[in-house]
Amino acid sequence: MAAQIFSAITVIIIGVGGCVAYFWGANRLVDLIFPSRGVAGAAAIDNLRRQGLVRPWLFVGPAMIILTIYLIYPVVETLRLSFLDRSGINFVGLANYEWAFGDREFRNSILNNIIWLAVVPAACTFLGLIIAVLTDKIWWGTIAKSLIFLPLAISFVGASVIWKFIYEYRGEGQTQIGILNAIIQHFGGQPQVWISLPFWNNFFLMIILIWIQTGFAMVILSSALRGIPEETLEAAVIDGANPFQIFWKIMVPQIWGTIAVVWTTITILVLKVFDIVLTMTNGQWNSQVLANLMFDWMFRGGGDFGRGATIAIIIMIAVIPIMVWNIRQANKETGGH
Amino acid sequence: MAVATGNSFASRFGVHIAVLIFVAIWTIPTLGILVSSLRDKNQIIASGWWNSFASSTQTEAGRLPPASAQAEKDGKFVLEGNIFGDGAKRDISAFGVKSAAPTQYTSGTTADLGDGVTLQLNADGSFIMQSPKAFEGDRGQRIYYASSAPPKFTTDNYRTVLFSEGIGRSFMNSLTVTIPATIIPILIAAFAAYALAWMRFPGRALLIAVIIGLLVVPLQMSLIPLLKLYNGVGAFFGMPSKTYLGIWLAHTGFGLPFAIYLLRSYIAGLPREIMESARIDGASDFEIFVKIVLPLSFPVLASFAIFQFLWVWNDLLVAMVFLGTEADQIVLTAKLNALLGSRGGDWEILTTSAFVTIIVPLIVFFSLQRYFVRGLLAGSVKGG
């Protein structure tokens, strides 16, 4: 154990230290090559100008290199690979795309993704909004919000274990250790193997993401609700509006922009949902989704990069319009900051 | 807000109840694995965790002493004793001698095992077995009994997963991935953000536009080309393609657009006068950055750090693509995923491992909640 900790610390120091050393060292180097102190006036001004030309690139250089290798090149390469066969050598035209839309598993994934898209963002936003409004009215609201917010810090894998334990199934008549089946058995129902129930299993996986993301929606909507001017609410009360009218006609319209940002943010997350499906079912029992299917094709039978890349492109095509709209909207909401 | 709705007692009471229900639904799942991880492993499968403070009934198997322990009494051969030895006292409710019917007889009654052999097992574990013929063999009679055990809490599960299931090692691996993968992008992004906000150079506006454009690229786009690239580079230099350096850089790359976007908008908002007076005093850009910009940007740096830390710690996809699955590289999330496959029904292992993987994010979350919320508000555009 001690040796592990030591080697971990060494590796961390080398990694972080190397990065610090670059910025410090590169900066020193510029100062040494173009000295601005201790040289005659004209030369110093000249060197300062040269420093000014070089230094910005030293600062943005590492970021540019990394962004090029890790994001720009891959986008182009993925697009290219989607027109090649599994080996990534032979050009096959649109064959991968034809395969995708004819493939039963792919169509199943698309269908499931659509169900996820229809359910999860709506459920998270709706629940988040209700909880935000309710917790604002009680003295222990902050504590309640913290507790509901907490799952957001939990990894999807951790959450999957947590919920798998809830869905745990034992044969009928046995002691159920999964709370869901225990409740059902207590009321005389039939225990079920929830995660392999065709079609409905999707919803049991979605509950996990809803459980995680409701806290996100709640926090953001809660801060938006705080921004509603008191006067509008007071005026509504004086006019005799009931709580439901105030909620739907006064509060919701004023935070409409924020609701849209929350909705689209969760939508993007849903399009890329991967961990939950991998750990809960790995796409069995018709619960496959695009991101997991892509991961599957990256390694299935030694990996088919052409098909994997094709699925990646389809995910990107679905994500980009929503993302562009989301960033625009978020910028508008925060005034560009 | 307080004035917004009716203040009748009933409606206020209803709000409390409703929030209480929401809180219960959102906390009970996590509570379930926390409680289970502290329970004795036999009790986890014997009763639901919500019953963990009550005695649990479990069926166990045991063996009576061998024939050599028998005594002859009144023309009968007798085996006597207590199946619990001197150990813990438990209440036996039923017993049996066949695995198919482990609770055939109520404790305290005498069971007829055929050929005149009888067995009586009492609630306290004492037994008496009698036979007209001498017992034979050096293995005693197999018996099954349902006993109710008092609730038992233990940290054994943590000892097991940390030291023999490899979770302890994975914990170190996760830290090894997460700490540099958090610090490196901060450094790189902070320098870039400063240059993009306060230094003048050709192409600056274009660079900013490109970086904002890269925010929309989903992670999935990068995986296949990078996997190919890493394999190629590894083969070319004769090195392994799955390294810590590789995953640090990958996380750095995926985190950079958001980091630069977030830091630049903050740093650009710092007061111009401070920068200019420092420049007049002869400070270089590097000095201004280190001595003025970094300290002033602490809140946004902290927000991003927490965001990135949690993101990397909780990541499964990038780790599965860019790191190996051997003990020296597998991170907690990947290990937990592997355990779900290999130890599917061993809930003492799974719940405890899950709790170990979520404990660090929970600590970060509770201690730095303020920065976390701020990062979240700003980070709604990242989304992975």
Image (cartoon, coloured by chain):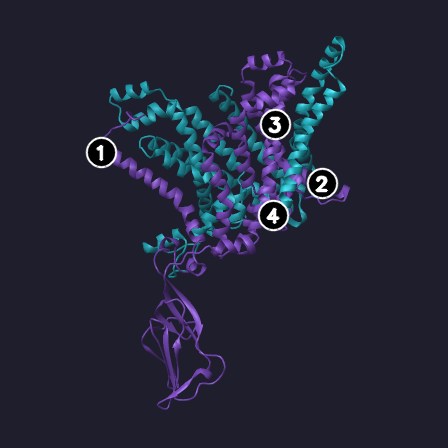
Chain colours: A cyan, B purple
Q: x%, y% of residue A151?
A: 45, 40
Label 1: few (<14), some or many (≥20) within 10 Å? few
Element type where label 4 sits in the image: loop
Does B75 appear above or below A99? below
Q: In the rendered structure, which disc, 4 or 3, sits on the residue that comes first in sequence?
A: 3
Q: Quadrant of the C terminus of chain B?
A: top right
Q: Are marks 4 and 3 on the same chain?
A: yes
> Which of label 2 and label 1 is nearer to you?
1
Q: On what subunit does the disc labeled 2 rest?
A: A
The residue where tag 3 is placed is: B189
| Distance CA(mark 1)–CA(mark 3) | 53 Å
Secondary structure beneath label 1: helix
* Residue A307 visible in the shown view: no
Where is mark 1, residue-wise?
B9
Q: CA distance from mark 2 to mark 4?
A: 28 Å
Does mark 1 fall on the same chain as mark 2?
no
Query: Viewer-nearest of labels 1 and 3?
Result: 3
Badge 2 local density, few (<14 within 10 Å), some, or many (20+)? some
Choose mark 2 or mark 4, whichever is in front: 4
Image x and y of residue B106, in percent = 33, 72
Looking at the image, is mark 2 or mark 3 nearer the viewer?
A: 3
Determine whether label 4 and label 3 are within 8 Å by CB. Answer: no
Q: Earlier in the sequence, mark 4 or mark 1?
A: 1
Q: Which residue is mark 4?
A: B330
The quarter holding residue A78 reads: top right
**Three-letter code, disc 4:** Ile
Q: What is the CA distance from the residue labelled 4 to the residue labelled 3?
A: 28 Å
The residue that mark 2 highlights is: A88
Work out whether residue A242 or residue A160 is closer to the camera in this orientation and state it.
A160
Give x and y (percent) for residue A170.
Answer: 42, 58
